[in-house]
Image (cartoon, rainbow, N blue to C red):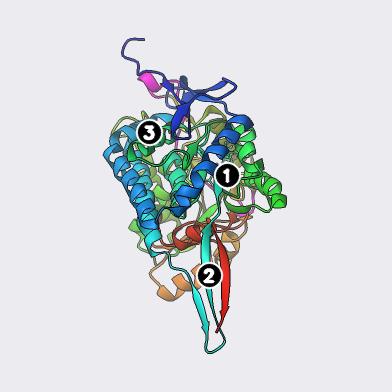
């Protein structure tokens, strides 16, 4: 086709080289904004994973022995290269995932660079503990890298979440076998090129592409992979835990969410509305931290609702590559259908549709893409399925509440516990509510404000363990205590 961009051919990155899958099988990669195949990715299996593990094991002794500062410098070099290739990576991410290129350019790719820079420099500050008992003994705790570790990431923030795992694993001295989502493999592939250019030693990072049940499962089952860091759906997390648990692997699971926004009548209404629109619809609602249940104190319910709907009406849905687009495509046809099934469910549960609800067919090149209007419901019971299950799309519910206790009860009324947002000017209430809400991450009068030093992760079915800062470096190391009698 004249003028059409070239098909993207992806290969595995094993032992510092780009290699085809051993069995020679490939999967189609689809551009969700067009609804068309635009490339092929390896459909790797246990043999490819075994090769990656061998390469990682061979690279491990030299990598762990390398002074932490030198390892860190290599990671900072990768960060610099990500920044230098920002536009190319943002375009690739947008095309692969359907997200607005403006979002990839300002959030996804810069944060991927930050992940490498943060852990590349942070490893130099990772001190070991010692415990001194006057006249008796001194204990000191050494933290050894684990060896070969597995990192498995999802499709919603592809490069950002991939690097969030890989960077601390490498910084701590491990070698990595990583698998990005088969739905969004493009930027992970490009990362391999940048690691080559940065001079990362062969085998230290291996990137294997393929499906969850085949390539992902082979990582989880491999007896010489010591730890699994996974982000994705709660059901997949459960399955991984069932496989890896009896093998006594270390596990970090970042799973789904059904996050509440608690909006009190004394809040800065304008800020609460503005940010709630963002927290509902950023990345088409496909962020595990999106607030999908907005609970609003009754005196301001109508006012909040009107202002919210006005802003939602201004969100431009369309071609992710257009600079004016605020809502791109959903990631896949299957996911679009899943989200649409929840819109039907919300209606059958008695929800009143206030905005959206329909598929969008933009004119021009994106006519076959997976676009959905930002959708808002009210009138649903706080404990109905729509308000308890993760939809992971541009669908939110508005619900009025009368008391703080009622708001907390509803906020905590799901199996999830990832994040929550509280809007109030009352400091006492802000802290009181924050301490009682079952969520691993709480934002007061803001959303998605991140400091990479803080523990990140969920309670209840939202996961096990925490990522970020020292938590991540602790996860990717094995403590060994040494006691010396005085
Ligand atoms: O995720 P999966 P899916 C939620 C969201 C979404 C649902 C399913 O609700 O609708 O999960 O999405 C790999 N062994 N989230 O199906 O399957 C898979 O290849 C090892 C929330 O896309 O969990 C991919 O690399 N790996 C979420 C990764 O796991 C396996 C982000 C995630 O895919 C595997 C994404 C197996 N048996 C979806 N099966 C969040 N919390 O950020 C799959 N994988």
Question: Considering the image in quadrants, where does the C terminus appear?
Answer: bottom right
Residues shaded magenta: 362-384
Image mark for residue 253: none
Q: Pick out the residue farthest to the bottom.
A: 135
Residue at the spot x=60%, y=37% of the render? 216
- Magenta stretch: dominant secondary structure: loop
Question: Residue at left 71%, top 48%?
Answer: 242
CB under 8 Å between discs 2 and 1: no
Q: Quadrant of ligand 1?
A: top right
Name the residue that disc number 2 marks.
Answer: 141
In the image shown, does 349 or 455 lie closer to the viewer?
455
Q: Nearer the viewer, mark 2 or mark 1?
A: 2
- Residue at image position (39%, 62%) is 445
Percent x, y of residue 459: 59, 59
Residue 351: numbered disc: 1
Quadrant containing the N terminus in the rendered view: top left
**Residue 371 higher or lower than 389, as above or below:** above
């Amino acid at each position: 086709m004249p003028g059409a961009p070239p098909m993207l051919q992806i290969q595995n990155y094993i032992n510092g080289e780009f290699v085809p899958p051993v069995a020679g099988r490939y999967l189609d990669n689809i551009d969700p904004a067009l609804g068309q195949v635009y490339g092929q990715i390896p459909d790797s299996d246990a043999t490819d994973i075994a090769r990656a593990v061998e390469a990682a094991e061979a690279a491990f002794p030299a990598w762990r022995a390398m002074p932490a500062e030198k390892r860190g410098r290599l990671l900072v070099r990768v960060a610099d290269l990500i920044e230098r290739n920002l536009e190319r990576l943002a375009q690739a991410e947008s095309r692969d995932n359907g997200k607005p290129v403006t979002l990839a350019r300002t959030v996804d790719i810069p944060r991927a660079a930050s992940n490498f820079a943060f852990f590349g420099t942070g490893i130099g500050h990772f001190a070991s503990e010692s415990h001194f008992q006057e006249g008796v003994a001194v204990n000191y705790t050494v933290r050894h890298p684990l060896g070969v570790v597995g990192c498995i990431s999802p499709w919603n923030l592809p490069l950002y979440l991939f690097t969030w795992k890989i960077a601390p694993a490498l910084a701590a001295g491990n070698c990595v076998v990583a698998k990005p989502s088969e739905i969004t493999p493009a930027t992970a592939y490009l990362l391999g090129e940048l690691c080559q250019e940065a001079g990362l030693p062969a085998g230290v990072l291996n990137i294997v592409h393929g499906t969850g049940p085949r390539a992902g499962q082979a990582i989880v089952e491999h007896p010489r992979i010591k730890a699994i860091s996974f982000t994705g759906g709660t059901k997949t997390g459960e399955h991984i835990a069932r496989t890896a648990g009896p093998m006594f692997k270390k596990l970090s699971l970042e799973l789904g969410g059904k996050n509440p926004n608690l909006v009190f009548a004394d809040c800065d209404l304008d800020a609460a509305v503005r940010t709630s629109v963002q927290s509902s619809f950023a990345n088409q609602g496909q962020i595990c931290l999106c607030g999908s249940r907005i609970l609003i104190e009754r005196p301001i319910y109508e006012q909040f609702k009107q202002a919210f709907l006005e802003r939602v009406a201004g969100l431009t849905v369309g071609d992710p590559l257009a600079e004016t687009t605020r809502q791109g495509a959903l990631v896949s046809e299957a996911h679009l259908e899943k989200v649409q099934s929840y819109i039907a469910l919300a209606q059958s549960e008695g929800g009143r549709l206030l905005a959206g609800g329909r598929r969008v067919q933009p004119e021009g090149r994106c006519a076959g893409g997976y676009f959905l209007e930002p959708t808002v419901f009210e009138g649903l019971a706080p404990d109905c399925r729509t308000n308890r299950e993760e939809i992971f799309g541009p669908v939110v519910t508005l619900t009025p509440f009368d008391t703080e206790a009622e708001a907390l009860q509803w906020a905590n009324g799901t199996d999830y516990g990832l994040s929550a947002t509280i809007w109030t000017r009352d400091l006492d209430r802000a802290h009181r509510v924050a301490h009682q809400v079952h969520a691993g991450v709480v934002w007061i009068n803001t959303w998605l404000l991140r400091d990479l030093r803080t523990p990140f992760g969920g309670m209840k079915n939202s996961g096990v363990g925490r990522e970020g800062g020292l938590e991540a470096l602790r996860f990717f190391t094995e403590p060994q205590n040494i006691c010396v009698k005085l």
